[in-house]
Amino acid sequence: MRLCLVSAILALFVSIQFQSEQCGLLVLLVVAVVFGSSSSPWRVRALAVLCVLLSAYYSQFWLFERLHSRLDANLSGVVVTGYGEVIGCSDASNNVEKLLLRVDSLSSTEKSLPSLKRLALSFYRSSNRNSTDQDNQKLEAKIPCGSQLTFTAKLRAPYSFINPWGFDYEAWQLSRGIDASGYLLNHELVGMAQGWRSQLIVLREEWIQRAASMEGPAGQLVPALLFGESGYLPKEQWLDFQLTGTIHLLIVSGLHVGFLVFMVTSLWYLLIRLEVLLFFPRASMLFKLTPIILLLACAVYAYMAGMGLAIQRAGLMLGLGICVIYLRSHWSLFDTWLWVILLVLIINPLSILFIGFWFSFAAVGALLMTYGGQIGHRSSSIKDASGQVSSAKASLIVPSLTPILATQASGKISESVLEKIKLLYHPQWVVFIALMPLLWMFQQPQSALSFFTNIVAIPLLGFVVMPMAMLAFIWPDGMVVDVLNVVLNSTMDFLHQISLLPSWLVYKPAGAWLFLLFPLVFLTLWLTGAPFKRLSLLILVSVFFLPTAVNNEKLIIFDVGQGLAVYGSVSDAKHDASVQSSWLYDTGAQFRSGFSLGDAVVAKNILAFSGQKLDVLFVSHSDNDHAGGEAGLRRKIVPVLTYAGQPRQQQHNNCHDVKGWKSLGGELNRWRVFHYQMANASDNNQSCVIQIEMGAKRILLPGDIDKKAERLLLATYGDELKSDVLIVGHHGSKSSSSKEWLMAVNPQIAVVSSGFKNRFHHPHSSVLTRFKHHSIPLYNTADSGAIEINLTEIMSVTRWRQKNSPVWRQNWQQM
């Protein structure tokens, strides 16, 4: 059976992760099953081959069904009218409500419109959806969950920024069954849905609003802790949790489910005792109902917590574990773990693409590998006397609390203080070691302090914050909320101070060094007792000395929508090619919600390319689409030098004061600023105009200057403006890129950074015509994703949307 489980899981993984090579890999998998497991009976091997074929077919069928109902990119911007039910809602801000609509009927003038099933729509409650002045606006009433309504909406096809590294929002929408996003133009409430599912949706929303109505940080954190709703937490605080390695505490998972089971088991045990004392039954009826009560509690809580990936894993493991225990089966925990992986992938095959899947199952697998024998020995000695439920056995399914719960359930308190201390740090040490290479594989920094912060944070959450959060939820007007706010304020201040120490963030080793860590970590966990001996310490210490940068030159224009972020890395080929320098021109935007492209896109990719190193940051001017992401970038990367066209911060040097060429990693790599004088210059015309020389190639970055500034530069510098690569000014606006400018620069390649179907209509058709007239190849991040230019003698261009093109990636064409 284990061979069949592993074969099915690998087939699902190959079918989703390696679609272009899946046929060959599936054949290899079948060959490995047939000839690599010769010790297994032929019937088992035949069944395993059947599992491979069924799993591969199922994953493709699942994808086809989801893709068949999705809005095509060519129809992006279509206006539809329809009737549906609100099955999810949250507040993005005071005047914007995010709605998830299940569509019952839909109509449009477009005959090729597919049968859309689920829409993610924004409801702008103010008359001006682009306005940020909320005090002087009359806001419409919110649309409650469970509402049935007729609506008119403007839709956008699923879309994602595509960069070498980053979150695939298009895949995430597909995994959630979202066929299109957009915003409501108008609507009319018809009534409230009456089905039991609708009533549960309404109840969940009422409970979330009840938790969010608490004063102070409790109103931000309790919805996340109890119901998996993190939208009330400011992005800055979310980043604090991420940088300190405690982000898992905000995701409803095994820790939360384990605490719930512990509470339910304790209360149910008291009821069993009360039944025995009052009625003296020969056999407790309540005890016979114990598995049903626990399974029901898990199911209800999992639904109320949003049925996220972590809660699916924890709930399924716990459910299977409860069944195994009460059926007195000898099913191993490892088989339970494999079954849960398979069930999660059957529910949603795309789960395998996301970081939460790997972290969740890797942490549990590492704990099972390390503690399985030890805790199994403990639990075997525990008797279910008087119909007592063995919470030690149940705790096997939630390994993050296993050592503590097993000790409590056995009723045996360790006589050694050292043994008690080990119960706190051993599991955290195992998880810390196990997740280290996975964090770097997904371009996440590993905090060297996360081991210590989790030793404090996990018991604090499990035994102080969670009980108080539940009490505060029951009595939101009581003194418990005040005490909880004191605890949360102290905890958040502590985490924030740690997050401000970037020197404690360890970034991934380069190249093959990262993949060497995987077998080392596996051996560390597999060998008996190894996680607590010298090998794990050796791995941890060695990471600090491994190289974190790959020595190669890059020029990448990141896909940041209607904004700009250009990154370059160079090496001194003449003297020491191992010494690299890196630079960044602009940081992308930060949105009103607090989401920063400087953090989510720019920092993530720079960390993947060059570790924490950034020698020079240029901020062309103060507009949000160019400078808004700087704060998010600085939370993870601190540039050595920063030059700005409009200095607004203490770290900024005025780029307009820079004279002559400046070195950038050797004689062949340098940069300079082109100056011009203009009275009453606009923000755009105060942009830093930078020319960077990388080897034998020159790159010109003019920011957002217009034709007036271009004429001044042409009069001053003339032929010096000639460059091999031109980043098109002002995103291709018709006010920039004059004919004379293009003739003087005469680039071999030009790149415009713009958002797909942006409201400014950049790049303008007249600009496209001018580039075409001068036979200059023009690339646009809107339909190409990130654009990487190889600065060899004959330059070549890599378009990441075309390079990273799984079956769900839509073909966007704007130019």
Image: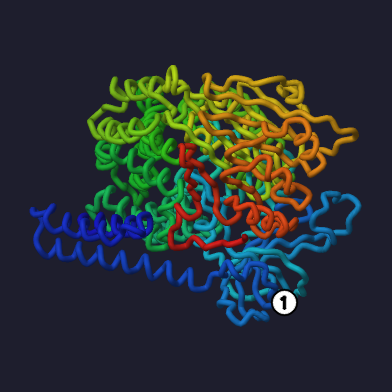
Identify the element where label 1 is drawn. strand
Residue shown at the point (60%, 53%) measured from the top left: 775
Residue shown at the point (72%, 47%) measured from the top left: 737
Q: Quadrant of the N terminus?
A: bottom left
The kind of residue on which mark 1 rests is Thr
- Does 199 sit left or right of 463 as displayed? right
The foreground one among 606 and 441 is 606
The foreground one among 475 and 136 is 136
Report crowding for label 1: few under 14, some 14 to 19, many 20 or more residues within 10 A (C-alpha): some
- Name the image quarter holding residue 102: bottom right
Residue shown at the point (29%, 20%) measured from the top left: 534
- Name the image quarter holding residue 512: top left
Q: Is residue 233 visible?
A: no
The vertical placement of 575 against 346, above or below, is above
The vertical placement of 476 against 810, above or below, is above
Residue 335: image x %, image y %? 26, 52
Residue 468: image x %, image y %? 61, 40
Residue 318: image x %, image y %? 39, 52
The foreground one among 290 and 399 is 399
Q: Count of labels shown?
A: 1
Q: Is residue 617 visible?
A: yes
Q: Which residue is mark 1?
A: 150
The vertical placement of 628 against 43, above or below, is above
Q: Quadrant of the C terminus?
A: bottom right
